[in-house]
Image (spheres, rainbow, N blue to C red):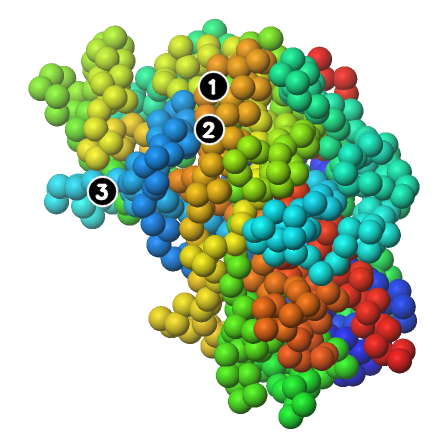
Amino acid sequence: MLHAKYNDEHLNISLRNKSFNQQRRQILQSVGVFFAAHSVSLSAEVLNQGAPTNSEKTTLAAFVDVLIPKDRFTGSATDLQVDAQLWSLAESSEKLRQLLAAGCEWLNQTGGPPFSELKYKQQYKLVAWMAESDWENVPRLFYEIVRSSAMRFYFAQPAAWEGLAIDRPPQPLGYSPPWH
Amino acid sequence: MALANPDVIIIGAGAGGAATAWRLVSKGLNVLILEAGGRFDPQADYKLDQPDWERHAFPEKKNSQGAVSIAELGPLNSDYVDLASWSQTRGKLAREGKRKPSGPGYWHVQGVGGSTLHYVGEAHRLNPASMRLQTEFGVGYDWPVEYAELEPYYLEVEKLIGVAGPTEQGERWRSAPFPLPAHPLSTSAQALVQAGQQLGMQWQANSRAALSQPYDNRPPCNYCGNCSKGCPISDKGSADVTFIRHAEASGRLTIKTHCPVVGFELSDNGDITAVSFIEQGQKQRLSATSVVLAAGAIQTPALLLNASQPGAKEGLANGSGQVGKNFMETLVWNSTGIVSDLSNTHMGLPADAICWDFNRPDAIEGVVGGCRLTSATREIGFTGPIAYASRAVGGFGRKMKQQMRQSFGKALSVGAIGEFLPNPDSYVDLDRSQKNSLGLYSPQIHSSLGEQELRRLRFMAEKSRALLKQAGAELVEEFTTYDHFSATHVFGTCRMGTDPLKSVVNAYGQSHDHANLFITDASVFPSTGGGEAPSLTIQALALRTADYIVSLKTT
């Protein structure tokens, strides 16, 4: 009675309206907390970045798909436009934009082919190393911030919920007992 | 009503201000509320019907946050490193070796309804023993009011907002049952009841300002589990849909929103003769017979300290020098684990079960001041997949996705809140480095944990961990105010008492210095209690103060 019934279009609307600005702000606040807590030095080459290059787009897409790959239940991060949402978010934060640039640059300077052209096992090993690396350096900071943001974008979509014990938002129906 | 000449001006439309207004208009007085924030629309503002609801915190709107700063919180006490916050995904949450604010640190809402808009809605009476800390236990301060005097007011508040709970409340004796039956227990609450029984603890349904049946033209709770993001169906007993709704229906209440108060005028005899405020960029002033300050334990002392003037050089109501002193915060412990046998713990009412066993001031050996334990899974946000992926399930790749499916709906959290004793290093003063946009100095919070608080926290941690272990949980996150300042309940900065040299207001919330100035928020609390949620006591005290104001007008 109080709410429009949920449908997929609802998400698209919410992304366009002002509530999205608040969500962006909240995600960017969490990015800001990371930067405040961990001093990281970025090289001059990654400052003053504009729109992402094709190389950056390809690299970030490959990276988030290692974080969240496709499996038999649900699609990959890029299937759900997580990479595009990250680039959109970076338009609101120079710091995030710089970190994405630095992270992509680092991923492609490991001495071999670009990250996106590595075999999955090689990509996985590299990301696993990043996840355990020093908090004060770009690889770990990039991993943590991109992972955190990617999870927020990915799991905010019903297409990511297959296999989880949830199939709709909490309202308007709520959850009637019993709950076993 | 004649707006230019209200009987009473109330500053703040939160728990205390709303209850005061309702009582005063019920007695036939005309009331004006000056509210710094605006109104929230439950259906439009709370986004729980959207698939990305987890990414929406309680909404920030124009003027919904008061200006406040937090002073350096100091280094962590290395004797208590076992209390550090951590999560499965992020490791240690405070790596800098010093205590830091969590988010804004002081979690509050300015607006019609105040912080009841984002509260979970626990409806607790204070343990009578916690009101006699000095006399019985030699610490802190006594309340100048006894539980027996508050009991009928508690009943009235519970009836108005529609509290659901079990009649048996131990030391919090009741002269009548709650108006509504207790809510059913969630799967997570049932797990804690069972684990508690095995450990010799008694758990019971929590008393909750959420409707278990239709009541007062409001629908029953549908157990979505997200009270703190705002209740879109209005079954939660926040002040806007209870006290304010009824008070406005009387026709004797006017609320001016987005009207922050900036000053007070005094007569030679010390009475408040006018209140000045900003309305649409213009400074206005209004007078009333009585003025009630109900802006919360941070902004209330700030307004008083900002109002220093001839006749009140140290600020209004501050003849004792106690305004801003005795700041008491929320002492919090949360432990969360994954229990493979559980399911659907994201469903049900938050904080639906409680254990009062350690609530008395002498319940914890070697420490004065108790605590309570609650079922906290939904209260701390394990209500959707983003929370699990961000806090409980680490790593990445297909293994992460598989673990998400194995873990979702199985989080079990124990929350503990404990007594906070006043100490000289915890207080609220003014940040005099610069004035804010209103031309006032903003409040600055100073916080320090005493040895008693740290020892109490350790007890809370041990009990929480023991419960989770008994329930078969694998720990994934612990959050504590040992290394974070994270206060929702704040108290004590305008303490009530009988001695004008040692307290700010008397037992009726009346300023010792200004006969027509009253305070009806948690700043008047002499003690915090052993973890009880304060809103019910704020509102019971507010009704009592309102009755006193009416009696003064009558006589």
From the image, tell me which residue sits under label 1: B475
Structural distance between the alpha carbons of marks 3 and 1: 30 Å
Structural distance between the alpha carbons of marks 1 and 2: 8 Å
Residue A14 % position (x, y): 56, 40
Looking at the rendered structure, the kind of residue marked 2 is Glu
Looking at the rendered structure, the kind of residue marked 1 is Leu
Q: In the rendering, which numbered label is found on residue A6?
A: none
Q: Are marks 1 and 2 in contact (CB under 8 Å)?
A: yes
Residue B369 % position (x, y): 58, 42
User: Which residue is painted at 32% across and 30% down in the image?
Assistant: A144
Q: In the rendering, which numbered label is found on residue B478?
A: 2
User: Which residue is painted at 17% across and 28% down in the image?
Assistant: A106
Q: In the rendering, which numbered label is found on residue A39?
A: 3
User: Which residue is painted at 70% across and 45% down in the image?
Assistant: B129
Furthest residue to the left?
A111
- Residue A130 visible within the image: yes
Residue B548 % position (x, y): 82, 69
User: Tag 3's secondary structure?
Assistant: loop
* Vertical relation: B322 (above or below) B246: below
User: Tag 2's secondary structure?
Assistant: strand
Q: Chain of mark 1?
A: B
Local packing at callout 2 (Cα closer than 10 Å; few below 14, some 14-19, many 20+) is many
